[in-house]
Amino acid sequence: MHSKLRFARITLVSAAAVAAIATTVTPAQAGARSCHVLVCNTTEGSGQWVEKITASLTWNSRFYGHFQVYGRGFSWNSHTQSWGHPATWERTVRRALPTGTLVCVAAWEHVNGRFVQRGNACNKIK
């Protein structure tokens, strides 16, 4: 009787260990690419870890202004200049972000002293 109880405990512990390993082997993916209007966002990383975010332009796009890269706990702006495809601007994030966090790239055109958004591409950390 005592050996059956011991076998049941070992089986239960083994099943819990297998379940824990299974959940850590299948992390969410941070790597993604999206485009909106004239801006694209390439988010590089693994799991919830975001290594860097690259802002770029869609094929044959141009504008005078700046890129903004932002998400939970960070926001950076590029220099204001003329941008044209295939120019890129990247920012290193190097942090884990919570599931559901949006990381975005916006293109802001400078027109007559105003900022006009020319796209806002976001990727969601899953």
Image: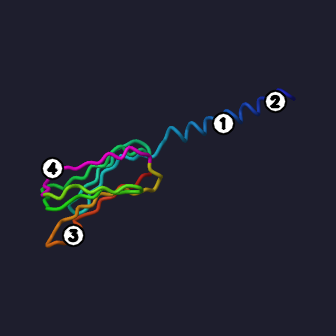
Reading the image, the residue beneath label 1 is 15
Which of these two is toward me, 49 or 112? 112
What secondary structure prevails in the magenta region? strand
Name the image colouring: rainbow
Labels 2 and 3: the sequence-earlier one? 2
User: Distance of mark 4 from mark 1, alpha carbons?
Assistant: 51 Å
Label 1: which secondary element: helix
Determine which residue is flagged by label 2: 4
Q: Which callout, 1 or 2, points at the residue further toward the start of the chain?
A: 2
Amino acid at dot 3: Val
User: What residue do we see at 22% from left, 50% from top?
Assistant: 89
Do the residues bearing badges 2 and 3 touch, measured as CB atoms within 8 Å?
no
Kindly report the distance in space between the C-alpha atoms of the residues bearing marks 3 and 1: 56 Å
Q: Estimate the x, y position of residue 47 in percent, counting from the top left.
A: 43, 43
Name the spot of residue 87 as percent of width and height, x first: 16, 50
The mark closer to the camera, 3 or 4, is: 3
Q: Is residue 92 magenta?
A: yes
Q: Amino acid at mark 1?
A: Ala
Judging by the rendered image, the residue that carries numbered circle 4 is 86
Label pair 1/2, CB-CB below 8 angstroms: no
**Mark 4: amino acid:** Pro
Kind of residue indicated by mark 2 = Lys
Numbered badge on residue 116: 3
Q: Nearer the viewer, mark 3 or mark 1?
A: 3
Q: CA distance from mark 1 to mark 2?
A: 16 Å
Local SS, label 4 = loop
Quarter of the image holding residue 92? Answer: top left
Query: What is the magenta range?
Result: 82-96
Question: Is residue 120 rendered to the left or right of residue 14?
Answer: left
Mark 2: secondary structure: helix
